[in-house]
Structure formats: C-alpha cells, structure tokens
Amino acid sequence: MRIEGFRRRRRPYRDRLYDDLPPGLRLRAQQWLDKFCKRHKRRLASERWLYPILVGQARRLARTTPEQRSQWGRRMLGRLGGLRVQRLYLYQGRTGKEHPAHKASRISATHRRWRKDEKLREAIGLPPKTRHKYLPIF
C-alpha cells in the first residue's frame, strides 16, 4: 500500500509553494516573494535556508491586511517597551518594594480596605470617618 503524501511530485518546487492559497492571495504572495528575492539576491545564492523563510513570510504577508500588520507591530512595540522599562527599573535599583507595580498594588489594597470599612460603617449606621486624625481643639 502506498502513502499518497510520499509520492514523488513532478512539478517544480516553485509551482507548489502556494497551492493551498486562493488565486488572489497566490498572486500577492508571489509578488511579496519576488520583492524579497530581489532584496536578498546575493545571500540566496549561498544560504539555502533563507528561501523557505522568505516563502513563509510572503505567505503570511499575503494573508494579512495592512491594518492587521500595523496592529501586530504596535503590539510588539508595546511589548518591547514594557521589557525595556523593566530593565530600566532593574538598573535603577527599583526592585522589590521600590518597584512601581508593588507600590501600585499596595495603594490599591489600601483603597479596597477603606472602601470595605466604609461599607461596614454604613451598614452599622455609623457616620463616615473623619479625614483628619486629630480634630482641632478650640
């Protein structure tokens, strides 16, 4: 019994690259690949691993819209910015309790505690707490 997937193909490799794509996307992917091949003409002659990578990139770019690619780029820039800020905090020694995230979580926990106390005082029928520790004496 023969396995269909292992059968020798007679068509050139270049014709099989985009068989699973619809005709419009196939043309767009081929245009992207032609653009990449012109850009990397010298490297393609010596580095055979580069061509399949360019084919994959051409397929990806053909399937996505410019808006999707722009969103992806913004998402990656945001991620990179977050990593850079964390590295900056590390260099500045802002780790542990000095880290802004830890400070924010402490403040958030304090606010939650205050709100919980206010609800409890309201349920019991007590007036809200004063905003000063000591009332002025006249």
Image (cartoon, rainbow, N blue to C red):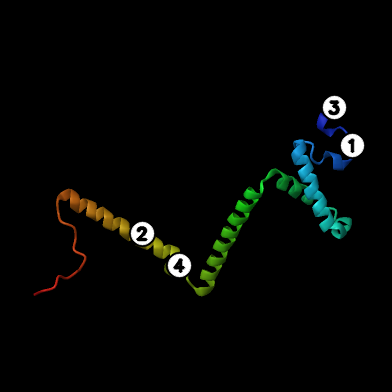
Q: For residue 11, which numbered disc appears in the image?
A: 1
Q: Earlier in the sequence, mark 3 or mark 4?
A: 3
- Residue visible at 80% across and 53% down in the picture: 35
- Residue visible at 18% across and 63% down in the picture: 130
Q: For residue 2, which numbered disc appears in the image?
A: 3
Q: Residues within 10 Å of mark 4 (few under 14, many from 20)?
A: some
SS label for mark 1: loop
Mark 4: amino acid: His
Q: Which residue is mark 2?
A: 108
| Disc 3 from disc 2: Cα separation | 66 Å
Q: Which residue is mark 4?
A: 99
| Disc 2 from disc 1: Cα separation | 65 Å
Residue 111 visible? The answer is: yes
In this view, which residue lies farthest toward the left? 138
- Residue visible at 79% across and 42% down in the picture: 27
How far across and how far down the image is residue 5, in percent? Answer: 81, 32
